[in-house]
Image (tube, rainbow, N blue to C red):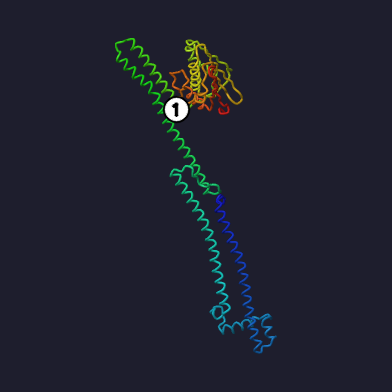
Amino acid sequence: MKIFTNKDIRRLFIGISAIIILLLVFCLIFSKGIVKDFKVRMLNHDYEVAGYLLKHGTSSSDVSAAFTSEKTEEETSNGKNFLVALGYKADMNNQLLPDIDKLLFRYRFISMLSVIIFGAFIIAIFFIYFKRQQNMIERANLAVNNFMDGDSTVRIDDNEEGSLYKLFTSINSMATSLNAHIESEKHIKEFLKNTIADISHQLKTPLAALRMYNEIIQEESGNEETVKRFTLKTENSLERIEILIQNLLKITRLDAGTILLNKREENIGTIVQEAVFSFETRTEQEQKSIIVKGSNDVILYCDEDWMIEAIGNLIKNALDHMESGGKIEIVWKETPVITRIIIKDNGNGIHPEDIHHVFKRFYRSRFSQDTQGIGLGLSLVKSIVEAHNGTITVKSTLGKGSIFTLDFLKLTNM
């Protein structure tokens, strides 16, 4: 029965059962004592009667016969009539029979004392049981109140068996879940706070530039060449703001988990070719090259559009940090455990001081010559890769180039 999984209830039933067994044993001993006591008093009465008869001249043979011989119905009837006439009958007052009266008083007293003792034992067991239950509930109530007052580490002791402890376990689980939600809310608020601060900071420069360009255009409205030049600058600043906002929205939505990735089995070769295609014009103009190597039958479980975005950002980052004649090499392969994409370039490389910060949002190296970048490309790549349960690492040698490695565990795609 489930009720007996509760340790306290088991103890209660064991205690009550032990008292009942002791009571039964006591009753057996008590009844045996009553019989023995009654026998002693009956024999004493017979001794008195025999002694009285012998003292007053009754022969010993007659006295012996009176106690040991089998009585006839007539003798029994005559004796009964004689004693009834003297007042000796069943409904006579016990006070007229001192032995009976003493025996009755004695065993009434013993019975009452026994009931009081065993009743006290049972009451004590119930008191201990309910007191323990009350203490447990009060401790649990105190823990809940402390939790409600802000102590998120407090928990109720639930190391025993039983329904009450199961309830405590459920309360602890609920508290843990609430803590997780609270921490999640804190992270979200902190994330939004930092994001808003980042947006505000990053928009200051292009907005200030736009304001300045607008003033110059207004002041030089008659100078067509100046208006044309600063209109172009205005377009560049607006484009920078647009890229900033779009990338921020993408990262925010990925980090917040509000984007539902449309994951399917996609051919990596197709994804890489799509990413490379959008940079063909730029590579030709800047006299740079992109080389792709990999099997045409390697499959990656991913959202194709987002993966193209990630690889495209890595290509753009490499192109931004290499001189004319530079080369980018994209290789992909698979093992029984992982699918790997490697993007290698022979560009400027990353300074050792920056290698551990390149994936941070808005990080700008003090060694970088790129004045137009806003520091979101690699952060976006990292968010996309992690949204696909992958990892991204980088190795770089200053002046020789960088190697970005994307690893995706194949087991997570099953």
Can residue 267 be seen from the camera position used here?
no
Q: Identify which residue, 343 or 170, lies in the foreground.
A: 343
Q: Residue at x 40, y 18 (%)?
A: 239
Residue 121 in the figure: left or right of residue 232: right
Front residue of this view, candidates 125 and 52: 125
Give the residue at x 56% y 70%.
110
Question: Where the C terminus falls, by quadrant?
Answer: top right
* Name of the residue lying farthest toward the bottom: 57
For residue 142, say whether it is visible: yes
| Residue 153 to residue 320: above or below | below
Report the residue at 47% width, 29% height from top.
255
**Residue under numbered circle 1:** 253
Front-most of residues 162 and 280: 280
Badge 1 element: helix
Q: Quadrant of residue 218?
A: top left
Q: Dot 1, crowdedness within 10 Å: few (<14), some or many (≥20)? A: some
Tell me residue 340's x, y (percent): 57, 22
| Location of residue 1 with respect to 49 vertically, above or below | above
Question: Image quarter for residue 408?
Answer: top right
